[in-house]
Image (cartoon, helix red, strand yellow):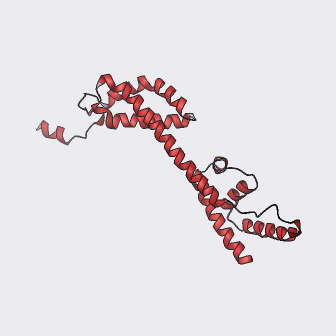
């Protein structure tokens, strides 16, 4: 009878034991012992403490989820290998993000025209500037902020995202949508 009640009781994941005899509690103690060294190694590979903390969290999750079969003598080395892999993955993601941002920025660049043209077209330039100002003024506040920071303050999308405390993807999306709206507005007025 007691056997059945044990079978129906909730499972305690901290008591899961892998082939090497490692429980979650074992990994917690190994991880805590290695954390200063892991943090130091990751600090040399990553830009800021937040990125280091994110990688350390991923290493701990990997240890708990996948490390149950690592033999005791290899646990420390295994953690450092996972940490190196997490740092490499971080930089691969950063490279992809950087290439995507560069591509989007190139697509988002507003052509202000050739600055070397004859100044006899000053009236046309003034009219174009007025039309551009009207198109920007018609944008919703969230889009207008980004356009103004990008065009008038020449900030990068990362700087804009940091200043507005929004994700960089949000800044890029708002810029792309703002440019599409401005294009429609300028097409209507010309």
- Say which quadrant the N terminus sits in: top left
Residue occupying the point 32% across, 31% down: 24
Quadrant into which the C terminus falls:
bottom right
User: Where, by quadrant of the figure, is residue 46 drawn?
Assistant: top right
* Residue at image point 17% right, 40% down: 7
Q: Is residue 69 left or right of residue 62?
A: left
Vertical side of 149 occupied by 42: above or below = above
Q: Quadrant of residue 143?
A: bottom right
Task: Looking at the picture, tell me which residue is in the foreground, 187 or 117.
Answer: 117
**Percent of width and height locating residue 23:** 29, 30
Left or right: 114 with respect to 174?
right
Q: Within the image, what quadrant is residue 20 found in?
A: top left
* Image position of 147 (left or right of 28): right
Vertical placement of residue 184 versus 174, above or below? below
Residue at the spot x=69%, y=66% of the render? 139
Image location (x, y in percent) of residue 40: 51, 26
Q: Is residue 18 left or right of residue 189?
A: left
Name of the residue lying farthest toward the right: 120
Q: Up-down: is 190 above or below 56? A: below
**Of the pair 46 and 178, the residue shown nearer to us:** 46
Residue 185 location (% of width, % of height): 70, 73
Residue 4 place in picture, x, y as percent: 14, 40
**Count of picture labels:** 0
């Amino acid at each position: 009878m007691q056997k059945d009640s044990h079978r129906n009781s909730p499972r305690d994941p901290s008591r899961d034991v892998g082939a090497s005899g490692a429980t979650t509690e074992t990994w917690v103690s190994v991880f805590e012992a290695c954390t200063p060294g892991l943090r130091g190694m990751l600090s040399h590979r990553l830009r800021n403490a937040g990125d280091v903390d994110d990688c350390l969290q991923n290493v701990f999750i990997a240890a708990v989820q996948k490390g149950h079969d690592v033999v005791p003598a290899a646990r420390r080395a295994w953690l450092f290998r996972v940490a190196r892999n997490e740092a490499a993955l971080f930089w691969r993601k950063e490279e992809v993000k950087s290439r995507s941002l560069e591509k989007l920025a190139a697509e988002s660049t507003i052509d202000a025209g050739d600055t070397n043209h004859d100044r006899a077209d000053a009236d046309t330039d003034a009219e174009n500037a007025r039309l551009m100002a009207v198109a920007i003024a018609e944008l919703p506040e969230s889009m207008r902020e980004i356009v103004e920071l990008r065009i008038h303050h020449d900030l990068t999308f990362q700087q804009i995202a940091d200043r507005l405390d929004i994700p960089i993807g949000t800044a890029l999306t708002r810029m792309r949508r703002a440019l599409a709206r401005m294009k429609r507005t300028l097409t209507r007025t010309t």
